[in-house]
Image (cartoon, grey):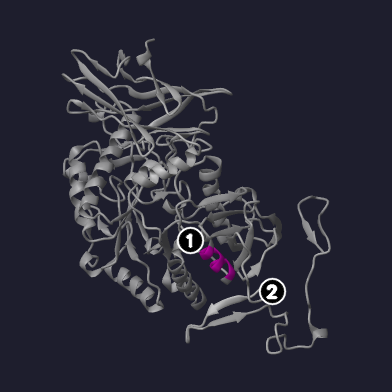
Amino acid sequence: MSIRDFKQIDGVTLQWPAVTLAFPGQKYILENELYEDDDIRIQVSLKKKDGIWVKHLDVTAKHPMPTPDYVETDRQSVPDPEMRLCGYINAQKRGKKSNPEEEGAGEIPGCGYPLIGDKIFVGLVHQAGFAVIEKQDEASTTYSLRHHPVWNGNRLETLDSVFCVSEDPKRSFSDYIDRVRAPIELKPFFAFCSFWSDPYLGNYEYAVTGEAMQRFIAAYKKLGIKPDVFTFDAGWQKRKSFFEPKPGLEFENYPHLSLWISHNGPMGISPEFLKQQKIAVGEGYSSAYCGKDYGVLLDPALERALTKRFCELARHCRHFKIDWDNDCATAPEFAEKYPTRNHVREASLNAMNRIMATVRAVNPSIIVRNGWWPSPWWLLHVQHVFLSQSGDSEYASLPTRHQRASAATHRDLMYYNHLLRDHTMIPLSSFDNHEFPNSIRNAFADTEGTWADNIMLCLLRGSTYFSWTIQPESLTPYQADVMKQAMAFARAHAKHLFVRAGRMFGGNPGLGEIYGFLQPGDKESWCVLRNPAPMPQTYTLPDDFKYATQFYPNFRKLEREFVMLPEEVKVLILTEKPLKLPYDIPFQVFQNQSNGKFDYYFPASRTVSKKIQPMVAELHQIKELLFEKIAWAENRRNLFFT
């Protein structure tokens, strides 16, 4: 090889240009930055921006050429043996099974994720690019970056790749995504929705009416609970149209609006209507929603119609809740240009990305949720991505005392699988975790304690998107008051609750291990701890948590080791120096709604002063209850506390 076959990039020797284009029966393996013959022109370039090297590939055909099997934009062996794919992968194959109409049944494809090690990160800048570890030993990693483009006229729709050498590649990658992503405000966005109260009629239809939505909104107004928007979920639209509202749901009557929409799902647009418009309808096995009767995003007519209508909708609303997409839907007439599922997926996502770019030109501040697998490159186009497989009606197999605890454990098990097991690079602020429902079709039997605990856990997970599907008629005065106070708390303390570098820590919720979410700050950090087990557990704070002051469910100083009660939720403030509290015993503080002052509450068994003490004499008081012995029965199935 000549010296032109290598490049020194920030102290790492890379092969250059390391590009391969594979066509049926022919491969182009580049030896120089420019290749040209009678059929094709291929140009490779490299530039550095904000510490990140960006590799660009420009491919032009001189006459019609077939779709390439794949394009390999990079293949390197680098001196970083710790590189790994950072993104959620299904632990088990789900299989091509048939699901009920309201449920998804796809499989996470494994694309759109970076490779990150101790020194280096790399990736393709797209939700559909594949980063693959080809070989790994104790000294190095060999990887490839591949994708599956098609021709757009005489130009191939290639993807850029990124490469970075860093002392902290995970931090550098997070900073990179933060620079290039769609804008997000680090404050709570409450979007209330009637979805789980809307009767499902079958055949992708819901009973959603203007009267029902008006009364739903009026009920919350009467309760004094004010979300940022109300979401018209699936069923607000006439399915035999491009998202025209049903009577009574005209946008001018609803100033704070979020809209559920779909690019190609039959829940959004009737396949019969699409066929009448001479738009292709097909099927495909995708990341979430599968089967037949989906619009084909490869059809330019569908992309044009959606672009026009979504831009019109964006002028009337603050938020899009995108759902029910099949990113792999195709039809026989597209088979030659898009020969594999990978080609279909990449081209379908390109269509979605183009639509969203046009929408943002119309409404730059619109907030969007979309993305069924947690590729960080979704965030170039949307603010929030699904926490995969964390739907509204899923429960953990871990034994629990309460239904709400089982749902929370499943949700946080998916957080654990994404963030701690698979090292997914989506920030906490950008997850849609489907939290939390309580409605006619998704009812929960909450105690006052489980209600308050779940709201605090919800706020402290770090997500800025709160898609609450709560039926207002179900709320007790206590529940409504807790909701109101919690929302005010989140808005007032947003700088502590919603940060750029939040993280999950601790054990596996699915195994009953204590875990938490940390929102770090300059002077103080806030975090939530949860014991998912239905029995007490001792917990020791991590070494980097210097001083911990609990403020929920009550104020108290915490030692480094303490006991968490069954399914208990604690919220802590972490500081470099100890905080001063006005009392040494646990206490609670509530703001008096009538005069704005703060009222203090203390344990009923404790003497605080002559005015604040138990009513009965000391000899009638029970100072404390202690378990002297905790032991398993001989059958190892029963635990005894004595």
Badge 2 marks a residue whose secondary structure is: loop
In this rendering, the label closer to the viewer, 2 or 1: 2
Badge 1 marks a residue whose secondary structure is: helix
Q: Is residue 389 visible?
A: yes
- Mark toward the start of the polypeptide (2 vs 1): 1
Q: Amino acid at mark 1?
A: Leu
| Tag of residue 497 | 1
Is residue 34 positioned above or below 609 on the image?
above
Residue sitting at 58 percent across and 70 percent down?
447
Residue sitting at 48 percent across and 76 percent down?
481
Q: Amino acid at mark 2?
A: Asp
Of residues 533 and 549, which is closer to you in this image?
549
Is residue 415 positioned above or below 207 on the image?
above
Q: In the rendered structure, which segment of residues is drawn in magenta? A: 449-456
Q: Is residue 372 visible?
A: no
> Dot 2 corresponds to which residue?
584
Is 132 on the left or on the right of 203, as rendered? right
Mark 2 vs mark 1, CA separation in Å: 26 Å
Residue sitting at 33 percent across and 23 percent down?
70
Determine crowd level at label 1: few under 14, some 14-19, many 20+ residues with C-alpha closer than 10 A: many
Please provide percent x and percent y for residue 75. 41, 22
